[in-house]
Image (spheres, rainbow, N blue to C red):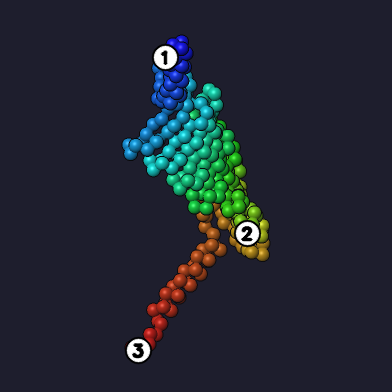
Amino acid sequence: MPFKRLFLSFAFFLFVSALCAQVSINQHDQSGKKTGLWETYHDNGKIKSRGTFLDGHPVGELLKYYPGGILQASMIFNETGSTSYVKMYYETGNLAAEGKYINQKKDSVWNYYSTYDKRKAMSETFMMGKKHGPSYKYYQGEKPSEFHEWQNDQKNGKWEQYFENGMVRLTGNYLADTLNGSFVSYNPDGSISISGSYTGGTMDGKWTYFTEEGEIEMVVEYKEGIMQPNPEMDKRIEEFSKKVKDAIGNLDETELPDV
């Protein structure tokens, strides 16, 4: 009988010890690194973060919260803690962004969402924390509104904008974050409205403007962003100025009814 009581007491001791070990938080291992469950709190006493650590780095799911208690981010870490898949949230609870970190730097495709209508508003491609690859902005329904190519955190390559019907609105090129090369603007039906080129971020060379019927309306020459003398353009500016002056004159001469 005494042996049985001793056995039960010992078993109960082991159970309590195991239970205490399970609920212990914010512990360090023998080398001083974070281990087990860790929690931090905001000044108002509400949970700020909760996750499990091993050898000083997070493993599995790590959750972060706004001071009001709303989930701010969910991060799923691999066994070494070097890679995490992240979902970030607005304080409304709606998804704000999602993507991958490698060694705490953005990598691969990241998607961003509108706080108003929850739609995907933009996507960007990263390589070790720098934009590298295609990026898109979107209309509702995930139809692209703009496209850029990036290299090493700079705009390099094709740039396009689109109408909501999917037709190309304009197309150009970037070199080292600066507009460089051909530029074409289109009408919604696909016909060209303007064509020209950029050099070092400024309009350069001949720029051609077309009518809605596709005929050449005017050709203007630029040098380093400065429009060169152009009789046709000067005539148009003069005609526009005259119309403005006439309109102002008509307003001055308007007869008001007697009161």
Please name the residue shown 55% across and 42% down the image: 111
Cα separation, mark 1 vs mark 3, equals: 97 Å
Residue bearing mark 1: 30
Q: Which mark is residue 201?
A: none
Q: Is residue 237 above or below residue 38?
A: below
Say which quarter of the image contains residue 158: top right
Q: Position of residue 119 (x, y in %)?
A: 55, 50
Q: Are marks 2 and 1 in contact (CB under 8 Å)?
A: no
Q: Quadrant of the C terminus?
A: bottom left
Q: Nearer the viewer, residue 71 or 138?
A: 71
Residue drawn at x 40%, y 35% is 48
The residue shown at (48%, 32%) is: 62
**Amino acid under disc 2:** Asn
Q: Is residue 37 left or right of 79 when viewed as pictured?
A: left
Do tag 3 and tag 2 residues touch (Cβ < 8 Å)?
no
> How far separated are the C-alphas under marks 3 and 2?
49 Å
Q: Estimate the x, y position of residue 49 in percent, counting from the top left.
A: 42, 33
Would residue 230 be visible to someone looking at this image? Answer: yes
Specify which label sits upstream in the sequence, 2 or 1: 1
Q: Which residue is mark 3?
A: 258
Counting the numbered discs, the total is 3
Q: In front of the other: label 1 or label 3? A: 1
Graded by Cα atoms within 10 Å as few (under 14), some (14 to 19) or many (20 or more), the crowding at tag 1 reads: few
- Outermost residue to the bottom: 258
Bin the neighbour count of mark 2 within 10 Å (Cα to Cα): few under 14, some 14-19, many 20 and up: some
